[in-house]
Amino acid sequence: MSLPSIVILAIVQGLAELLPISSSAHVVVTEKLIGLDPSSPPMTLLLVMLHTGTMFAVIVYFWRTWRDTYFRDLPSFKTFALQVIVATALTGVVYLGILRVLGRTVFAHTPKAQIEDLFGHLEFIAPALAAAGILILIAGIVTRRATARAVADDVSLAQASAIGAVQGICLPFRGFSRSGATISTGMLLRVSRRRVEAFSFALAVVLTPPVIARESWRMVRSSGFTAVDLKDAAWRSVFGALIAFIAGLGALRWLSRWLETDRWYLFGIYCLFAAGAVALLQAHGH
């Protein structure tokens, strides 16, 4: 894997992971366009490290906000911890429920291990991107027209539960942006933009380590991954993580600025155009 390919993929991951435009959709398309094999062990290691880089970007960017909001005293921390636990539990329930239903219906004859991989196909990514775009567009337009209505500066347990459930829908459907869907849900539930942004990415940080652990385990179990492969791929992956970290910080500043200046809907328009582009690629055999 060449360094230019790593740089391109790291920038795409760093931007798309944190902007509400779906990193999985953009990474899958990028891999196809530059001829990378996402199933190869070195590629799996690189993607794990890119996720790690973006996770640290989120922690660095939001740490002061989280400290002042959630860790300022024990009652605030207890409330936050309960919300995160409930939201994350609902994420898992919804996610596993979707996989189970699809495994018994649409993909009844598909091995369980392959069901998630099917969502990396462009014919599934395009409609997921379109659905995310519509949700973001609706949230952006509704909140722009309802600026006079009061918004809550705290996330209630019911609102946290709804956000967690929506996050569970996002996980299997590559293209259905996690940050786009969860932030839009919070906006529609009349949570302040700054607060729902901080809460959404707090959920992401809680969710990312298990995802990284799962992908790492899949990499270890893959055949043909030798110590020589690890040595050659490790430094490239660390380099990619650094690029993804820098790109992620830039993406978060961009997201916050557009969210606070009533330009959230523009991400929805982008997702709709991206859905059309992915559909064209799929129609041309990619």
Image (cartoon, rainbow, N blue to C red):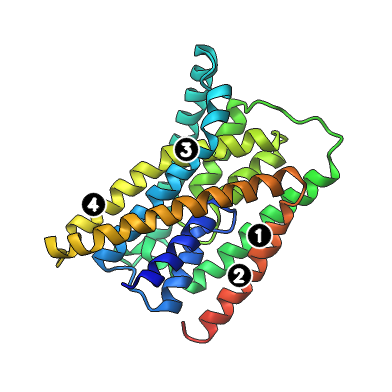
The residue labelled by disc 1 is 133
**Amino acid tagged 4:** Trp
- Marks 4 and 2, how far apart in space? 32 Å
Which numbered circle lies on residue 59?
Answer: 3
User: In x, y percent, where is residue 50?
Assistant: 39, 55
* Side of 153 where 100 appears, left or right: left
As helix, strand or loop, the secondary structure at mark 2 comes to helix
Quadrant occupied by the N terminus:
bottom left
Q: Circles 1 and 2: CB distance less than 8 Å?
A: yes
Q: Is residue 106 visible?
A: no
Looking at the image, tell me whether mark 1 or mark 2 is earlier in sequence order.
1
Q: Circles 2 and 3: CB distance less than 8 Å?
A: no
- Marks 1 and 3, how far apart in space? 26 Å
**Amino acid tagged 3:** Ile
**Amino acid tagged 2:** Ala
- Marks 1 and 2, how far apart in space? 9 Å
Looking at the image, tell me whether mark 4 or mark 2 is earlier in sequence order.
4
- Marks 2 and 3, how far apart in space? 30 Å
Q: Which residue is at 36% across, 62% downward?
A: 115
The residue labelled by disc 2 is 275
As helix, strand or loop, the secondary structure at mark 1 comes to helix
Q: Please rate how many residues cluster around mark 3, counting C-alpha atoms within 10 Å: few if below 14, some from 14 to 19, many from 20.
A: some
The residue labelled by disc 4 is 217
Nearer to me, 151 or 244: 244
